[in-house]
Amino acid sequence: MKIAVIDDWQNNARSFADWSRVEASHQLDFYADHLTGAALIERLAPYDILCVMRERTLFSEDVIAQLPALKAVITSGMRNAGLDLAAFSARNIPVSGTESPGHATAELAMIFIGMLARQTVANANSMSGTGWQVATGRDLRGATLGILGLGRLGSQLAEMAKVFGMNVQAWSQNLTAETCAEQGVAYADKEQFFATSDFISLHLKLSPRVTGIVGAAELSLMKSDAYLVNTSRGPLIDVPALCDALRVGQIAGAAIDVFDVEPLPADDVMRKTPNLLMTPHVGYATRETMSIFYGQTCESLEAYLAGSPIRLLSA
């Protein structure tokens, strides 16, 4: 079998798992670059099995149809919006997943909040030259954190924020006061949520219903000294509206780990937007999480090659 591990952006997949048993009997290739279009098809066409990192490469029905040799796919996580599972199923191509602990992303959101609060980037940049203090931060204790989406990761962030003495409130389109009470956070309606939060962190599963859920109207409700954090999915935010708000000082700043297009193009306007802290979608990219992703990818590979696929995803 020919097997490809793709989108290994940090070129470290080999170090997080023992691939030796697979390599003993099969061709195993690792790719750290990111391809799309015809170049992607040309590279992947010879392979029987693909090991993919969730949502780094999109596999639409059109792409899948151009990979006639493909027999199986293994993805990190048990959910991957970049895979057309119905198209794979129609071609009898099984898709296996891995466990995904998730807490690393909530941790990054909390780190972002702390960095924004203490003006870390401005002060660190000053110290990298010849400067000293250039910006005054604020306390987390007593500040109000608004969590947009109180699911697994949103609830984890709420618990972290409470340790710092923050007041936590939540809102989403289907969230109820009863659910908030169960999680020990306050419920706010939409207008109150955006108008009274000092920090807003997004934690929603992407769908057409929530695409652009934070746009110009929502940003206009926020306080001028408030901050926005997104470690969830890029399209939840209307990016042009956010960039405009940051340029004119409508809000104090933002921290973003996820983008509409990834990797972020070199000429993207976000790279030159002021008061914007960005990281390259590293919310889940910790040693511990990668050990689970690649370790269980190996496990799933061996299971498929033995004729008994595990952790199968369905459309």
Image: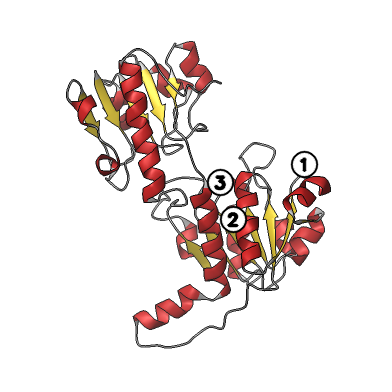
Q: Name the residue that disc number 2 marks.
A: 240
Are the residues flagged by discs 1 and 3 in contact, CB closer than 8 Å? no
**Tag 3: residue type?**
Arg
**Residue mark closest to the camera, 1 vs 3:** 1
Q: Is residue 215 visible?
A: no
- The chosen color scheme is secondary structure
> In this orientation, which residue lies closer to the viewer: 242 or 285?
285
Secondary structure found at label 3? loop
Tell me what residue is drawn at x 68 percent, y 48 percent. Answer: 150
Percent x, y of residue 168: 71, 61
Indicate left or right for 258 with 6 as reference.
right
Secondary structure found at label 1? loop
Q: Is residue 166 visible?
A: yes
**Vertical relation: 292 (above or below) 238:** above
Indicate left or right for 67 with 269 as reference.
left
Indicate left or right for 32 with 201 as reference.
left
Q: Name the residue that disc number 3 marks.
A: 233
Percent x, y of residue 180: 77, 50
**Tag 2: residue type?**
Pro
Are the residues flagged by discs 3 and 2 in contact, CB closer than 8 Å? no
